[in-house]
Image (cartoon, rainbow, N blue to C red):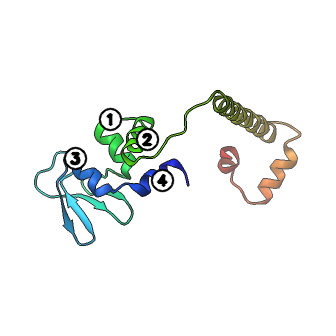
Amino acid sequence: MTVTDDIKQRLDIVALITESGVQLRKAGRNFTGFCPFHPNSRTPAFYVFPDTQSYYCFGCHASGDSFNFIMARQGLDFGDALRQLATRTGVQLEQRTPEREQEDAARVRLRQINEDAAIYWQHVLLNTQKGQIGRDYVAGRGLEQATIEAW
């Protein structure tokens, strides 16, 4: 289980949204109220779904989970929302160590190498004589040119 999953499991989205100042009322298994993300004082279009720990506004289409709500409501980025909700739920966040920083840097470098390799091999496939065999193969599979270029 990831840290975010652990936090979500410990949170009650109804309590979180209510504590932020949104007045909710029970509507069957769900809760409804006025959306905090757009002006509307006539029809409650904001729904909170406890079963899925999510929300949706039928007026402005704002939606998400506890993290999305806190980020939108308080103008936080994901890291700040993670720290705030971890503190609220008592979940301990892993401290960044020099070793972890090196692992992350290596992972970023590996992703860049893979992206560069993909660009190179796409060029070979689409623009070189050596790529003709590959072009014939994918054409024989019925792939359209736009699909070949995209992938």
Q: Nearer the viewer, mark 3 or mark 4?
A: 4
Which residue is label 3 attached to?
36
Determine the secondary structure under disc 1: loop
Q: Nearer the viewer, mark 4 or mark 1?
A: 4
Q: Mark 3 or mark 1: which comes first in sequence?
A: 3
Write down the residue under mark 4: 6
Q: Which residue is mark 1?
A: 75
Image-based side of 110 in relation to 91, left or right: right
Q: Nearer the viewer, residue 149 or 118?
A: 118
Residue that sits furthest to the left in the current view: 42
State the separation of the CA atoms marked 3 and 4: 26 Å
What is the three-letter code of the residue carrying label 2? Leu
The residue at the point 39 percent across, 41 percent down is 87
- The reply to whether the C-beta atoms of the residues labelled 3 and 1 are less than 8 Å apart is no
- Helix or strand or loop: what does disc 2 sit on? helix
Q: Which mark is residue 82?
A: 2
